[in-house]
Amino acid sequence: MSNSLAIATVTATLSQILQTAVNTDVAGATVRTVRPDNFRDGNPPRGVSLFLYQVSPNGALRNMDLPTRRADGAVMEQPLAALDLHYLLSFFGDEAQMEPQRMLGNVVSALHARPVLTRERIRAAAAAAVAADPNHFLGRSDLAGQVELVRLTPMPLGLEDLSRLWSVFFQVPYSLSVIYQASVVLLEARERPHAALPVQSRSVAALPLRLPQIEQVTPQSPELVSGAVTITIQGQNLLAPSMVVRFGALESTPGPTATDTEVPITLPTAILAGVRTAQVIHFLNIGEPPTPHRIFDSNPAAFLLRPRITASFSNPAAGPTITVVAERPIGPRQQVALFLNEQPPIAGLTPRAFSFDSTGRVNDMAAIPFLVPGVPAATYWARLRVDGAESAPQTVVIP
């Protein structure tokens, strides 16, 4: 990599190359690293203006060092800026003798024959500058040690773009010009990254790509009873030496009867009624000691986990109440509603239906009371809906 003097070193080296090229045909021509409007050399001026008019990030290497810092700001690796330099070469001289065109021909021929700033050229330019001035800045440049060589490429520029470029020079007549791009210059910040600890041992594992795929869950609407509830996951590539089936934040481990296409699984005891998803997760045990690392996930498959209930009517001081008891507790944040449908209906009349919401629960509850004021005496089918999953209807009598 190179330090902050790299840009100036490219300009100085390119200037020496151009000086050699223009002197082969036009005596007394000079190369100056100035703006075209500041170029003066004799009457008329004779030579080349080498002007760095634009610097842009290199598209291929601009992000190769990201990220360079940890979250606490410590440097992980040496910050590196990759830049492209854009030069305007303007030619001045006696138009009657076609000096600008002759110098242009020599410059283009020289840069086409040797379009790379080699390490020898950069060192020679630095040595010549230091010989003339021992304190010259090129003596501190390390561009010659950069990994990438700087390459020079002529850039096409239309009349419209050329007129826009020359418009930045106030009241300066246009001179014969070409554009060259020097790429790439790598600027390395002088920061010392924290060295990583050496690797003491390596653990490498290779395995084929086997993504688990769930096709269906059976039964699709199991009842959540007080005992063990088992479902079967069917699909492809389901089996792995280390695996779990995840139900949201809960997990279960399959038994020995699991196969690559069918995985019987017992639901976690803490699972709640409602619409739930099952997902097969594969792990790979690597490291020392072997530690499971998550590698493959299946698609999530939804199923409906219905509560199983009993319902009874009472008439306490608070008012007529139907108490629904679920075999598994219901969470305080779950949406719970009770539906009553009259059965059998009175002949010739439309059966009556009622619904009531449960509110104010702050803890898991198995027995949920519903105040049912205004419900006529009759026999009803009672259904409990929990997060969209409805229980089987139970008979409740309101006397």
Image: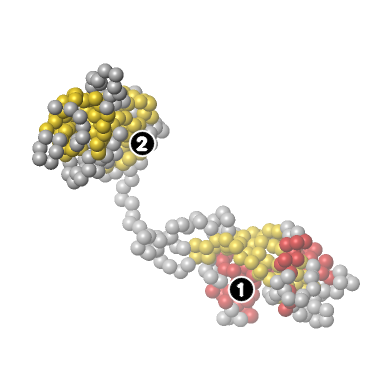
Inspect this view and state whether residue 190 appears.
Answer: yes
Q: Earlier in the sequence, mark 2 or mark 1?
A: 1
Name the residue furthest left: 317
Position of 220 relative to 137 (above/below): above
Image-based side of 346 in relation to 58, left or right:
left
Given the image, on which type of amino acid does mark 1 rest?
A: Ala
Viewer-side residue, 325 vs 213: 325
Inspect this view and state whether residue 117 appears.
Answer: no
Tag on residue 398?
none
Task: Residue 189 in the image: state x and y as whole percent.
Answer: 47, 67
The residue to which callout 2 is attached is 297
Position of 136 relative to 113 (above/below): below
Tag on residue 127?
1
The residue located at (37%, 31%) in the rendering is 212
Task: Residue 257 in the image: state x and y as whole percent.
Answer: 25, 23
Viewer-side residue, 252 vs 90: 252
Task: Specify few, some or many for label 2: CA neighbours under 10 Å numbering under 14, 14-19, or 20 or more.
Answer: some
Numbered disc 2: secondary structure: strand
Q: CA distance from mark 2 to mark 1?
A: 62 Å
Here the colouring is secondary structure
Position of 347 relative to 236 (above/below): above
The residue located at (46%, 63%) in the rendering is 79
Given the image, on which type of amino acid does mark 2 rest?
A: Asp
**Which quarter of the figure has residue 363?**
top left
The residue located at (61%, 81%) in the rendering is 133
**Which quarter of the figure has residue 308?**
top left
Task: Residue 36 in the image: state x and y as whole percent.
Answer: 73, 74
